[in-house]
Image (spheres, rainbow, N blue to C red):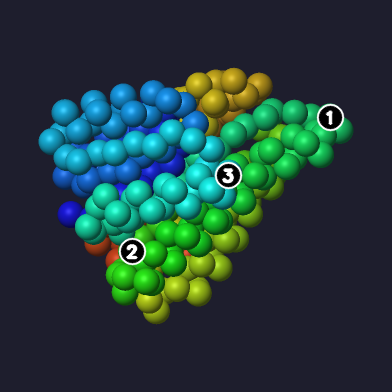
Amino acid sequence: MPAALITGVAQANIAHATAERLAREGHELMLTDMREDVAAIAESLARTHGVACHALAGDISDAAFRDRLMHLAFTNFDDMRYLVNCAAISRPTKPLDITPEEWRSVYGVNTEATFFACQSFIRNLLDKNRPGAIVNLSSIAGHSGGVNNGIHYGSSKAAIMAMTRGLARAFGKNGIRVNCVAPGVIDTAMARAVPGSEARVQAAPLGRWGTCAEVADSIAYLLGEGASYLTGQTLDVNGGMT
């Protein structure tokens, strides 16, 4: 089975649920996050599911770290083909209170790091003449403009949708598919910290929080052969929210 690199893996978040889902299917994994406990997560998944699972803690927005991460991912695994970009930060701030520093911080992780991780991953696939699949994590905020998360967060997630389409068009003929998942209000610590989340959940057609596992199922689908004719798409996993 193809190996996968997943960014932003922390306890009880979407990336963690995705790693759990892929490991259960037998995929080998390379995991990364700012938090040092990403190593313990990798060890637990390897022990539970009997798959090779490595971890590297660091800042995905740092170019030198990304280079090291990609080198390890393609060195440690013979069939590295999948990339899932989940790393993100949220800074719920009112429009007139957003500072240039905060804007750059959010874009540095959410948008810039996602793009350059894709770029480096695709270069490695091309060097090895290997097909692959990438799933980028956007957000319902990319559609709404950041009603509660902040305009900087919402626009950074909208940019991910655009880069997904662009990369899909550029590398589809190389056998590299690039898609995007835009979750609604998912039951994570990040979402719980956003003012107004509970009200949005109650107003949604399904009237409940989404789960990390439900988003992970969609990510796994987009990576797999069942989505072999899907590229450049944004899949909204939001319980009918608008």
Query: Element under label 1?
Result: helix
Give the image location of residue 215, x and y in percent. Answer: 39, 40
Left or right? Give the position of 81 relative to 169.
left
Foreground: 126 or 65? 65
Q: How crowded is the residue under tag 3: few (<14 C-alpha within 10 Å), some, or many (20+)?
A: few
At horizontal 42% and vertical 59% (from top left) the residue drawn is: 121
Q: Disc 3 marks which amino acid?
A: Asp
Q: Earlier in the sequence, mark 2 or mark 3?
A: 3
At horizontal 36% and vertical 66% (from top left) the residue drawn is: 125
Q: How crowded is the residue under tag 1: few (<14 C-alpha within 10 Å), some, or many (20+)?
A: few
Residue at the spot of label 1: 97
Q: Is residue 39 visible?
A: yes
Task: Measure the C-alpha gap from mark 1 to mark 2.
Answer: 41 Å
Give the image location of residue 27, x and y in percent. Answer: 21, 47
Query: Element under label 2?
Result: strand
Quadrant where the C terminus is found in the figure:
top right
Give the image location of residue 102, x and y in percent. Answer: 74, 34
Furthest toward the left, the residue is 50
Residue at the spot of label 2: 132
Quadrant of the image occupied by residue 20: top left
Q: Disc 2 marks which amino acid?
A: Gly
Q: Earlier in the sequence, mark 1 or mark 3?
A: 3
Which circle, 1 or 3, is nearer the viewer?
3
Q: Which label belongs to residue 62?
A: 3
Q: How crowded is the residue under tag 2: few (<14 C-alpha within 10 Å), some, or many (20+)?
A: many
Q: Disc 1 marks which amino acid?
A: Asp
**Above/below status of 140 relative to 208:** below
